[in-house]
Image (cartoon, rainbow, N blue to C red):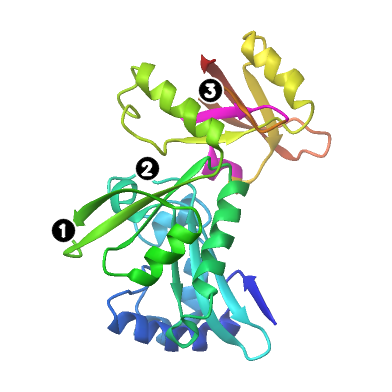
């Protein structure tokens, strides 16, 4: 049986064998090389567990929070491939060359459809973490990845030379919500926020969980300027002060854009369960 899992020690030996081949091809693991992982697999898994939080900087100081999954064969205990989904691309390298999703297929399992399966799963997770569109890149000479990305709906933006890898990178856009994409493009023409003026991927999109249209109407009237949710690290990976959110109605249509002003963690429930209070302001609507 084939399934996606959070990386575990059980599959590390198979992963190391796949990684050794990947390293020979010039594609290392950003956490550590195969020799380091082989020497201390437990430490490797501990580092993996830090990726889905702001503690990821303890692994590498340039990392941003991300979700990492392995595709494995549970019967044979073999590693098939991995996919990493970043919550945002808010650093100079990722917004140009890295993108939101990266994936790798064990050479033993290539040309069997697993690359597309990994990318499709990554896109599914991207939707779940409120991304409205994603950037994905591949080397110009990687014809296999190029076909997979285009099959998944990727539209070529441009090609840029990556001086660190000495190769041209193809940059693709995959739009997950067309109306949100269109609204963001309209907003970029009017905003005076130079921080995001030329950034296509600097927003998330979501709808209110209960009575989305009624609550949305209050936002449009400036009568609702905050919302709460139960505490989760994932939420804090998604939204921070300065985050732009496109709010959708019950039909998943983009209606307005708000900017997060403040985030507070409070204990206001009878069970003392932490909640997150997000304050925002309306910055754009049709």
Q: Which quadrant would the C terminus be assigned to in this image? A: top right
**Is 285 in front, or is 46?**
285
Mark 1 residue crowding within 10 angstroms, few (<14) / some (14–19) / many (20+): few
**How far apart are the alpha carbons under marks 1 and 2?**
20 Å
In contact (CB < 8 Å): disc 3 and disc 2: no
Mark 2 residue crowding within 10 angstroms, few (<14) / some (14–19) / many (20+): some
> Which residue is identified by label 1?
163
In this rendering, the answer to whether 58 lies above or below 212 is below
Residue 84 screen position, x and y as percent: 48, 62
**How far apart are the alpha carbons under marks 1 and 3?**
36 Å
> Which residue is identified by label 2?
90
Q: Residue at x 55, y 55 (%)?
A: 123
In this rendering, the answer to whether 228 lies above or below 226 is below
Q: Examine the structure image and report whether residue 237 is included in the region drawn in magenta.
A: yes
Q: Which residues make up the magenta segment?
A: 235-250
Kind of element beneath mark 3:
strand
Q: Residue at x 50, y 88 (%)?
A: 13
Residue 230 screen position, x and y as percent: 71, 39
> Which residue is identified by label 3?
257
- Name the N-terminal-most of marks 1 and 2: 2
């Amino acid at each position: 049986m084939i399934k996606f899992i959070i990386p575990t020690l059980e599959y590390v030996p198979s992963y190391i064998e796949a990684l050794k081949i990947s390293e020979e091809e010039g594609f290392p693991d950003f956490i550590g090389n195969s020799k380091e992982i082989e020497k201390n697999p437990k430490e490797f898994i501990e580092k993996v567990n830090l990726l889905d939080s702001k503690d990821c900087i303890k692994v590498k100081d340039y990392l941003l929070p991300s979700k990492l999954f392995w595709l494995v064969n549970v019967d044979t205990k073999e590693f098939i491939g991995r996919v990493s989904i970043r919550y945002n691309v808010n650093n100079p390298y990722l917004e140009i060359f890295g993108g939101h999703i990266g994936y790798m297929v064990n050479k033993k399992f290539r040309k069997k459809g697993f690359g597309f399966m990994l990318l499709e799963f990554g896109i599914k997770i991207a939707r779940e973490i409120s991304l409205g569109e994603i950037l994905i890149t591949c080397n110009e000479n990687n014809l296999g990845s190029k076909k997979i990305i285009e099959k998944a709906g990727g539209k070529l933006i441009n090609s840029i030379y990556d001086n660190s890898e000495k190769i041209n990178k193809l940059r693709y856009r995959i739009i997950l919500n067309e109306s949100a994409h269109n609204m963001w493009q309209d907003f970029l023409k009017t905003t005076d926020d130079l921080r995001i003026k030329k950034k296509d991927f600097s927003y998330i999109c979501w709808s209110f969980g209960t009575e989305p249209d009624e609550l949305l109407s209050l936002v449009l009237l400036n009568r609702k300027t905050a919302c709460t949710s139960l505490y989760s690290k994932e939420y804090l990976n998604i939204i921070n002060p300065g985050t732009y959110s496109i709010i959708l109605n019950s039909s998943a249509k983009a209606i307005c854009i708000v900017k997060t002003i403040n985030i507070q963690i409070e204990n206001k429930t009878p069970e003392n369960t932490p909640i997150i209070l997000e304050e925002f302001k309306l910055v754009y609507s049709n």
